[in-house]
Amino acid sequence: MPDIRIALTDKTIAQLPAPKDGWYLARDTDLKGFFVVIGKRKRTFTVQGDLRQGGKRASSVRVSIGNAGEMSTRAARGIAKAYLARISQGRHPRDDKRPEAGSPAPNGACGGAIAGVTLREAWQRYLEAHLIRKGRSEVTISGYRDHVERVFAEWLDTSLHELAMDPARMAKKHDDVTRENGPYMANGCMRTLRAIYNHARKTNRSLPADNPADAVDWNEEERRNTGMGSADLGGWFMELASLENPVRREFHLFTLLCGSRPAALQQIKPNHIDFWRRTLHIPKPKGGRKKAFDIPLSRQMILCLIRAIRLGRQMHPVQALEWVFPADSESGHLAETKEDREILSKWGNDLRQTFRTIATAAGVSEIDAKLLMNHAIPGVNAGYITRHKLLENHLRSQQQTISSAVFTALGASITQDRALRDWLGRARPRPEGTVSAGRQFVVRMAAGMTQGSS
């Protein structure tokens, strides 16, 4: 193909056709001597100019800047201007091995093509090499993606060097997000940007050492104290009993009884439940697969799971084959667990805080509560505790203590209130019968039978 002359941008370069054979040049209409070499498999930013000695042309110099698939046009153009300036001074661009790493070039470009990495490129590497490779949960990845691809959408094709050299831009963005989305979201977005920049700098030492996120004045964050005490549970159970969707009702109850993060519970499957051992396996909690753990099940938790499975089979028979809490969603399981506060006043992490509050009131030790919630234990004690050795007896006993405290708080209402009685009042079998029935039910469900037993 013959050479062409166009205004070079990321978009126009991406739209250029690949040649059937050989290569051709796409020259920039704005900057003389700056062009892209278009090959069958690669597109390379390049600069060309005449070296002069004594006012006369001595030789022509052509120098590649970098792969167009790995750096932005804006960054490449900045480097091209620096190279052309050297050529105009009679110096070869590669003399002195390019401008020193970290030193600013014209228009804020950084010497060396590697410093032209954009936020989009750095995010993709962070996603693949850090989040996915280390087994971070889908919910965690989704949160990072929302920050980068929604909140920082207008910066995706901006180089990290440019962001680092404009701290006022960071501070203004943090102020804008605080005003529009709240202080917690603003802080979270900047933490994400800080992590991506630090990760990118490991392989891009020419990036400035100062992280652009350090320019913001962080919003003050306070722990939300939204948990319930024993006296609050009666009213909350009444609200929950009137919830229209019974699968969601069981989900919120189970969240309260186990104290786990809702995002992890949304994705539990029937084969994660071991009714014989009375445990529920959580394969991908916050922190990824390496944080996988088993939750010991109390009698009330077993009954809750059995009800959820049976109701799920009735409401969503196809999705229930795979999920304990099925739904008509793209994933097939509950994906959104928020409720109208006027209908259900507490849900999500409110119930996680409630679990911790009830556990303390019931006399469960701080270490046992942390183990049940899969929290890290600070100090040297963590290295001397073997969690799975405590699971079968001690932790299950502590779990039963918490569940019993929850239901004891209901008092006589569990038999006197019709909604509660219909939902919970008649399901009080012995522990042994509960385990056996639950195990038989799950085995039959896995075999595709339509009838279960409780």
Image (cartoon, rainbow, N blue to C red):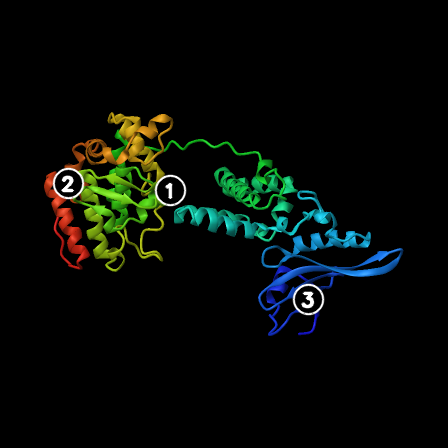
Q: Earlier in the sequence, mark 1 or mark 2?
A: 1
> In the displayed structure, would residue 37 be above or below residue 373?
below
Q: Secondary structure at mark 3?
A: strand
Q: Earlier in the sequence, mark 3 or mark 1?
A: 3
Q: CA distance from mark 3 to mark 1?
A: 48 Å
Q: Amino acid at mark 2?
A: Gly
Q: Is residue 274 visible?
A: yes
Residue at 34 percent across and 56 percent down: it is: 329
Quickly name the residue at label 2: 425
Q: How far across and how far down the image is residue 367, in percent?
A: 30, 28
Q: Which mark is residue 26?
A: 3
> In the displayed structure, would residue 88 be above or below residue 3?
above
- Of 326 and 10, the residue lying toward us: 10
Which quadrant holds the N terminus? bottom right
Q: CA distance from mark 3 to mark 2?
A: 77 Å
> In the displayed structure, would residue 349 be above or below residue 378?
below
Q: How far across and how far down the image is residue 97, in percent?
A: 70, 48
Quickly name the residue at label 1: 286
